[in-house]
Amino acid sequence: KLLMRNVLQHAPSGIFTVEYEGRGQVTFGFDSKVVKRSKNRMEVLFKPSVDWACAQSFQAYCGDNGMFLRIDGSDPADPIRNIRILAPGLSSSRFEFHPFFLRDIAPFGILRFMDWQATNDATVVQWEDRTRTDFASQANVNKGKDA
């Protein structure tokens, strides 16, 4: 799963903490590499690279840079799930959102996640057709159906 691509230098470099549940093999690539691994926890070094000539040409694709993770194997009886990736400096999974994001939205009383939830063009009419909470993504294009 691609997490970040062509971020130039707009993403923090450093050690990202990755926590997850289940048994299996999780790997990282592009500008990130696992530097420490323990049970259901990893530390991933992220050093974003930039092809400035490409970036200044406004091309949509400037090489394999950024961060991706891949699940290379997962135990069907105890699959990899609930993956949490914490930016440098956030060493606890108690954060649902980054503190900077929370600071930025503090002035607002109501947040509408219409685009994130794909509600504007939704074709779901019946409650049973909704995206269920155990589905892999709440922003899926399948409107709750299996992929």
Image (tube, helix red, strand yellow):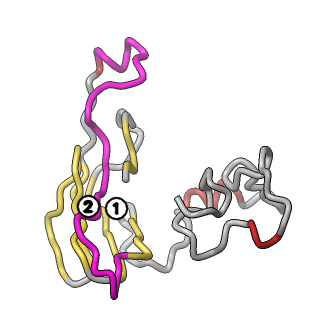
Q: Is residue 43 visible?
A: no
Disc 2 crowd rating (10 Å Cα; few below 14, some 14-19, many 20+) is: many
Amino acid under disc 2: Ile
Q: Is residue 95 magenta?
A: no
In this rendering, the answer to whether 134 lies above or below 16 is: below
Query: Dots 2 and 1: beta carbons under 8 Å?
Result: yes
- Residue located beneath label 1 in the image: 88
Amino acid under disc 1: Pro
Residue 80, quarter of picture: bottom left
User: Which residue is most to the bottom?
Assistant: 77
Residue 60, quarter of picture: top left
- Residue located beneath label 2 in the image: 15
Q: Is residue 55 magenta?
A: yes
Which residue is found at the position 37% from the left and 39% from the top? 5
N-term-proximal mark, 2 vs 1 = 2
Instruction: Give the magenta part as a residue range.
Output: 53-80
Q: Nearer the viewer, residue 25 or 18?
A: 25
